[in-house]
Structures are given as structure tokens and as C-alpha cells.
Amino acid sequence: MNVIQPAWCPPVLLALSLASFTAAAPLPAATVAQIDSIVRDTMRERNLPSVAVGVWIPGQGEYRAAFGTANLQTGRMRQVSDAFRIASISKTFTATAILQLAEQGQLSTSDLLSKWFPDFPNAGRITVKDLLMMRSGVAEYADADLLAAYYRRPLAPFTAQDAVRLAAARAASFTAPAEQTVYTNTNYVLLERIVERVSGQDMDAYLQAHVMMPLGLRGTFYATGPVLPSLLHGYSLDADTGTFRDMTWLNPQLAGGAGAVVSTLDDLHIYVRALCQGTLLRPATQTERLAGQPGAGSPSFIRYGEGVLLFGPFCGHNGTIFGFSSEAFYLPSKDAVIVINVNRIDLNDQSQSSELFLRLTKALFPQDVPW
């Protein structure tokens, strides 16, 4: 991954929020110093306005810290309690909803897409399971042109129906279903619409009742409007001017079931463990969910299950949306969780958190990671 050299670095970039640490069961001082050093070095190298990191390792301790500037205009420091857009980690919520409905007998993962979208290309061949596992062969609706338009007008109206329409118009680029794993957001916008049609509830209402409330996630919700309920701002570095552009307010419905959820560091700690342990599903459903397939062109240690990313020994997901880049992963062998959020994503939509995740996991779990 290319290192981005600083174009402009505010004087408070590397300041640490002293209120960020919990008093109970901290990780050893040497480990804390190591994490701090890795975060600071990565922020400096990649010109990151702020970072929040949570690490929970039972038997060793925990670490919660926020570094840098939440608002470049006011200079407000980042706090660990700040809510942020979790982008594609939202896919795990959408998939959980689908699997719950399947357990209730309201749908089957073998159902064909034509049951709900009879006119969608290949709908008579694509199953719900194909959509869950990124094996439907459908085209990406959020292509480079759409992302560029979204970047220019982040508050422009957009709906799930628009996403389905745009994807259908690209039928000439579809491939046969169930042949290869290719990550596209279209799969999860279609699944979002299926959840709503089958359950009779809007996505936000369904997730609150069946995911957030059962797990006690008080700072997590499916966003339907542009406002972010915290003082944290998200930024994109403008390649022409070398300055940061505020991308905090945007229409989350362009991402929809593929990326509209907002959460916090502590909520994701609870959630990603529950996700990977199968807390909200039956054991047989969870076992099938975690039977991932390797992605086309990806390293062999990266697989995609039913709405979960299996990244080496880790289970979870990551995500990017203008202004925010996040990682939320669980390591079963250690019962450990690591959550990272960076308040920067640029027009190229390249992750600003993945490098930090790779560095931290290499330092914390050197015997477990394949990188």
C-alpha cells in the first residue's frame, strides 16, 4: 500500500485525548506504548486528522484511545465516545437480518431474486445466498462516475431504488452467478430491499428491534438522514489543493444496506464479538455463515462468508465512506477484538485504516497473522 505524504498537517494532529483511556484492566504499559507509537507513526505518514482505537484482549487487558483532531475548524480533540459512519461494516448487519428472517421461515437463502425483483437481470438464477456471499455476478452500481458525483454533491437525493436501477442498466457486464466471489455493494442494497419487503419494516426499525436492542447497542443506528450525531467530522483530502474537505454531512442512502450504519468504538466491540460468535443466530446458521469463499484476485487468506470478512484468523469487516475508514475484527483464538476508525477517506475510496490494522495486529498477535 502506498504511503501518503502529508500535504497539510494541523498542529494538533498528534495530540492524545487524555480522557480516552479506561481505568479498568489496562493492557501492560509496554503494550500501550507500542500501540501509541504505531498509531502516531501511521498518522504522521498518512496525514490522518484523527484516529480512535480499541483493543480488548481477555486475560491481558484493554486499550481505548483517541488521537488527533475531530474538527479541523474548531480544533476539538477526538474522543473515544464519538460516533462515526462504519460504512461497509453495515453489510454484517444486513446479512444478520436476512439470516434471522431465514431462521424464522420468512425466506430461504435458496430463494431466487426473482421472487422480489422479477425484472432484474439474471434474477431467475441469482439466489439470496449468492447475494450474501458476493457471488451473484451483478455489476457495481457505485462506480467511479457515481462516486465522483457523490463527492461533488454528497447531499444529493438517492435511494435504494436508484441503486437497483443503475445496477440493472449495467446488465451487459454481469457474470454468471455462483462462479466467483466479487465484492459489489449492489448485493447488499438488494438484500436491504428484501429485508424490508419480507419483514414489513424499514431497515432502521428492523435493525433496532432485532440487532441493536438485543445487544444493547445504544450508539448504533441505521442512518436515514445526513446528520452525524457527534462532534466528530469526516474529511477527504483534496488532491488539487492539498487541504481537507469536510465530508461529515452526506446522504447515507447512497450506501443504504451496504454502508449506512453509524456506531461507536464501544458498540463495535460488543457487536463484532457477537457477530463472530453467532449470538443472534442458531449454531447451524452461524457455521454456514462462516464458510467463506476466497475472493477473485485476493490473497488465499482472505475469504468472504455470508456478510462477514474472514481475514486470516480474524472475523469481522471493514469499510470506507467519504470521511471515514473503519476496521472491526474478532480473533477467536484469543477472544480478542480490535476496532479502528480514521476520519478520512478521499475521492479514490482507498482505505485509510487498513494499514494501521495490519501494523497493530502484527505487533499484538505476531504468532497469529499471515502478513
Image: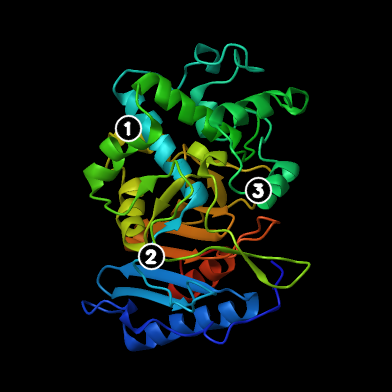
Q: Nearer the viewer, residue 286 or 105?
A: 105
Left/right of residue 239 with respect to residue 261 in the rendered view? right
Q: Which residue is mark 2?
A: 82
Marks 1 and 2 sit apart, C-alpha to C-alpha, by: 36 Å
User: Which of marks 1 and 3 precedes in the sequence?
Assistant: 3
Give the mark toward the camera: 3 or 2: 3
Give the mark toward the camera: 3 or 1: 3
User: Which of marks 2 and 1 precedes in the sequence?
Assistant: 2
**Image location of residue 185, percent across then percent down:** 59, 38
Q: Which residue is pictured at 51% across the width and 56% down the height?
A: 312
Name the element at disc 2.
Answer: loop
Query: Is the C-beta separation of discs 1 and 2 under 8 Å?
Result: no
Left/right of residue 99 with respect to residue 26 in the rendered view? right
Q: Which residue is mark 3?
A: 153
Q: Amino acid at mark 1?
A: Ala
Name the element at disc 3.
Answer: loop
Whether residue 365 is visible here, answered yes or no, is no
